Image (cartoon, helix red, strand yellow):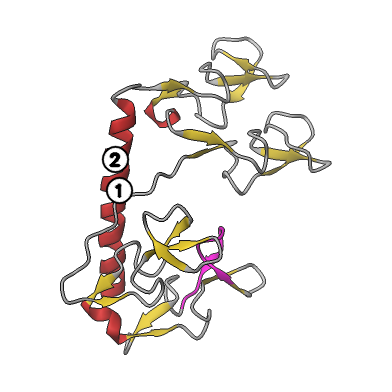
Amino acid sequence: MFLAQAAAYGAQKLAEASVSLQQGANSNMSDAACPQCNGKGHFDTWGNPCDPSNMHRKGPCHTCNGACRGPQFVMITRCGTCEGKGGFDTWSKPAIPYNMHFKSQCTACSGRGFKQVQAAPTPAAPVMGGSPCPGCAGKGGLDENKSPCDMADPRRKYVCFTCGGSPSHPGFNMVTRCGQCEGKGGKDGAGRNQYICEGPWNPCGGGAGRGFKGVGG
């Protein structure tokens, strides 16, 4: 299906831009220590960072998984939802996984406590003679209200989940909005329609998580 091809094309362009941005950052700093464990890689029984040889070591760091340092830690920011801890305790207060009262993982950062800084990538080149993506009106991105916006717009929060950032394709004039998810692309555990870009929702089967589907397919 052309939707999948368009999304794959957009994803490729975004990946190339991301690599370029990362290389640019790494030219000044090749790598950095994990901010969660201070480059030690592990935590002890009391929830303190420690070396892997520590006799009280309990497990690997939930942010770096024992890697200690690397280029991936150059451009990260602390998760504001869990205050960099990675989860919550029995009283819903931020806590690291090795806290004896730890209860649940933070969904905003997938339990890592930190998130990658997403710099605006270079917009994918439109296909000549293409039609604009109906999910983002040919813009490529979406703001926090899921309204179309350019990829370079500082208000952009999401990459369009319909085109994957490749906002023009000859086949977009042959798609219809998915009636099962009302163009939102996803459904929560209760089967309610949710924008797929907002969280870990289940992709709608009607449009394969894209909110739109091709005529006859």
Q: Residue furthest right?
A: 91
**Bounds of the magenta span?**
194-205
Residue 18 location (% of width, % of height): 32, 43
Residue 101 location (% of width, % of height): 79, 34
Q: From the viewer's perspective, tell me whether residue 126 is left or right of residue 139.
A: left
Classify 18 as above or below 2.
above
Residue drawn at (50%, 74%), measured in percent from left and top?
204
Q: Tell me the distance, in whole angstroms, between the alpha carbons under discs 2 and 1.
A: 6 Å
The reply to whether callout 2 and callout 1 are in contact (CB within 8 Å) is yes
Mark linked to residue 19: 2
Mark linked to residue 15: 1
Element class at badge 2? helix
- Nearest the viewer among 9 and 120 is 120
Q: Is residue 141 magenta?
A: no
Residue 162 location (% of width, % of height): 39, 70
Q: Is residue 154 visible?
A: yes
Badge 2: few (under 14), some or many (20 or more) residues near its Cα, within 10 Å?
Answer: few
Amino acid on which disc 1 is placed:
Ala
Image quadrant in which the C terminus is located: bottom left
Residue drawn at (60%, 24%), measured in percent from left and top?
59
- Nearest the viewer among 131 and 203 is 131
Number of numbered labels in the structure image: 2
Q: Is residue 160 visible?
A: no
